[in-house]
Image: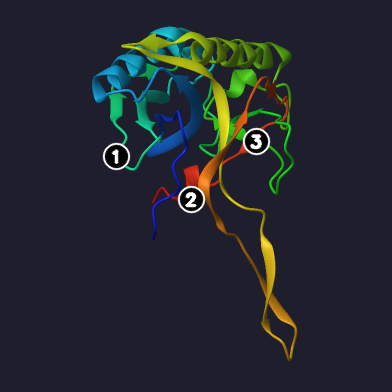
């Protein structure tokens, strides 16, 4: 499969989690930077700074059976962009009964451009039995706590800096043009939807976010465990 197009001045941020017996849960976000391509050393330092910034507020919204096992930052500005990691772990502080591994707290990020799928989203493996108002909704206190976590993360994305590289803001990265319907059989009219890769990734700035009071789901966090 051909490589994805480059995303100028952009870092991919991967948050890795252990959720019960699922050792590979991940949340991916992107952040814009200024000051030139970061080295691996700089990205290692930024990953460490990220943990320092958010590990306390993250622990407050995770069950004790969930562990943030670290982060990975990759420079997407070229095919040879550097990568950095931090593997310090943070264990959740909530002690009520754990929820299904598929249950997630949904944070959405409205952007100015409309596209198929609606808007960027992050599905965080947060919450436990004490975070529930009922079978479909989080308590208002839990929503506020997730809001505090996300605001802390956004503040880091707007001010983090190491070695001449300064983070600017969270962004959305689009690698594909809007889908096209292509007729594959002119006799029957059968068609399929195809997408074309962009030459250069389209970057959408993210300036706000919203925490959903409704439980969300990432079914793969249950289905992939055997």
Residue 72 located left or right of residue 93: left
- Dot 2 lies on which element? helix
Mark closest to the chain's N terminus, 2 or 1: 1
The residue that disc 1 covers is 80
- Residue 119 point in image, percent of width and height: 68, 37
- Residue 8 point in image, percent of width and height: 46, 34
Mark closest to the chain's N terminus, 1 or 3: 1
The residue that disc 3 covers is 216
Name the residue: 44% across, 17% down. 92
Q: Quadrant of residue 126?
A: top right
**Disc number lying in front (1 or 3):** 1
**Disc number lying in front (2 or 1):** 1
Mark closest to the chain's N terminus, 2 or 3: 3
Q: Quadrant of residue 1?
A: bottom left
Residue 201 located left or right of residue 53: right
Using a 10 Å C-alpha cutoff, classify the residue at mark 1 as few (fewer than 14 neighbours), some (14 to 19) or many (20 or more): few
Q: Say if residue 84 shows up in the picture.
A: yes
Residue 223, numbered label: 2
Relative to 224, residue 182 above or below: below
Q: Marks 1 and 3, how far apart in space?
A: 36 Å
Using a 10 Å C-alpha cutoff, classify the residue at mark 2 as few (fewer than 14 neighbours), some (14 to 19) or many (20 or more): few
Q: Marks 2 and 3, how far apart in space?
A: 16 Å
Name the residue: 71% across, 29% down. 110
Name the residue: 67% across, 32% down. 215
**Viewer-proximal residue, 52 or 194?**
194
Using a 10 Å C-alpha cutoff, classify the residue at mark 3 as few (fewer than 14 neighbours), some (14 to 19) or many (20 or more): some
- Residue 22 point in image, percent of width and height: 40, 39
**Viewer-proximal residue, 125 or 191?**
191
């Amino acid at each position: 499969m051909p490589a994805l197009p480059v995303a100028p001045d952009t870092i991919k941020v991967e948050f890795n989690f252990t959720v019960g017996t699922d050792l590979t849960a991940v949340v991916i976000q992107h952040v814009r930077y200024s000051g030139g391509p970061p080295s691996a050393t700089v990205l290692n330092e930024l990953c460490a700074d990220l943990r320092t910034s958010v590990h306390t507020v993250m622990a407050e919204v995770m069950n004790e059976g969930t562990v943030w096992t670290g982060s990975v930052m990759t420079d997407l500005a070229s095919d040879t962009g550097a990568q950095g990691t931090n593997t310090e772990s943070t264990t959740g502080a909530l002690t009520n009964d754990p929820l299904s591994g598929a249950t997630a707290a949904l944070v959405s990020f409205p952007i100015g451009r409309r596209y198929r799928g609606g808007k960027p989203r992050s599905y965080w493996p947060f919450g436990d039995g004490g975070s529930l108002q009922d079978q479909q909704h989080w308590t208002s206190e839990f929503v506020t706590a997730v809001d505090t976590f996300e605001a802390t993360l956004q503040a880091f994305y707007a001010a983090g800096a190491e070695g001449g590289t300064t983070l600017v803001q969270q962004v959305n990265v689009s690698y594909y043009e809007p889908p096209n319907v292509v007729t594959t059989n002119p006799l029957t009219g059968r068609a399929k939807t195809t997408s074309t890769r962009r030459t250069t990734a389209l970057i959408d700035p993210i300036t706000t976010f919203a925490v959903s009071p409704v439980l969300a789901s990432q079914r793969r966090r249950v289905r992939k465990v055997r």
